[in-house]
Amino acid sequence: MTSDPCRELRGVLGAVALGNADEAERVALRAHLDGCAECRAELRELTSVAAALPLADPERVADVTAAGLAQPPPTLAKRVLGRVAAERFARRARRRRRVGLVAATATAIAIAAAIVGFALVVPDGSSPGTRVALSAKVAGVSAEATLRGRPAGTEVAFHVAGLHQGEYYWLWVTGDDGDRVGAGTFQGTAKASDLVMTAALPLRDARRIWVTDQHDKVVLDERLPAPA
């Protein structure tokens, strides 16, 4: 079933594809796209549709105008793309419902196994973890992090100071394959911040921790030692 964030951002997908979204909408959508493959695929399709709109024959449009026929409103393209996105989400939801019984059974089994596994592998909360000081790529910024292995991945206890007030930042953890895995999004504050976030990457596979700003510029970065 489509999640609430996906439903709320359907209209924003069309606006971004047309280049009409404001900065706040783009930032919110980007944070959502980091963890939603469906919406990333949807945006690619809508962008290709939007790219074809300028190919419409202007002479045919002029002929229609001259004939005194009603012209479409300027917001028609945005509404059409939004409707296309909504229909595609609805079709995918119907497909998911058809296999809902099988998925529910599999989920119940997985949850039972996860509960048992969690009880067996939860680490001691007093574990000192792996502590690193991050190298600043922007003047005045400083940060350090403590990484601990958790059942869900790598927990990052993050202390940072000197970031720009109100700007959005992303914390990443990267493995040997070079793919970045998001641990979370946060805003800069005038005072130092203490944050706890989790990246879905096992601690044993983590090789780099880094922070980017809302323009995808690296602000903080540090390599992690390979496990012994």
Image: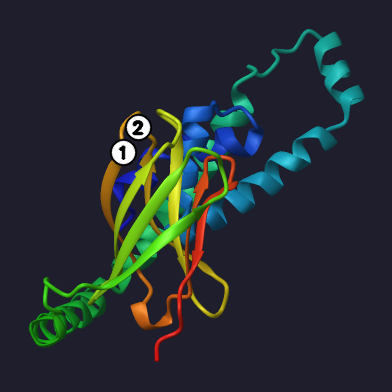
Q: Is residue 10 visible?
A: no
Q: Is residue 159 above or below residue 82?
A: below
**Circle 1: residue type:** Ala
Q: How is the image coloured?
A: rainbow
The answer to which image quadrant residue 191 occupies is: top left
Given residues 197 and 66, the one toward you in this image is: 197
> Mark 1: which secondary structure?
loop
Tell me, yes or no, whether the two marked residues, 1 and 2, touch with CB atoms within 8 Å.
Answer: yes
7 up-or-down from 167: above or below = below
Q: Is residue 225 visible?
A: yes
Residue at the spot 38% in from the left edge and 65% down from the top edge? 132
Q: Please tell me which residue is depicted at 65% across the width and 32% down the height of the picture.
A: 19
Quadrant location, the C terminus: bottom left
Q: Position of residue 225 (x, y in %)?
A: 45, 79
Residue under label 1: 192
Residue 206 in the image, given as x and y percentages of width and height: 43, 75
Question: Where does label 2 land, which residue?
Answer: 189
In the picture, measured across the screen, residue 54 lies left or right of residue 84, that is right
**Residue 147 - label:** none
Residue nearer the viewer, 99 or 139: 139
Horizontal side of 221 relative to 186 (left or right) equals right
Inspect the image, locate mark 2, and give the three-letter code of the amino acid beneath it.
Thr
Mark 2 neighbour class, 10 Å CA radius: few under 14, some 14 to 19, many 20 or more: some
Query: Total of numbered circles in the picture?
Result: 2
Which circle, 1 or 2, is nearer the viewer? 1
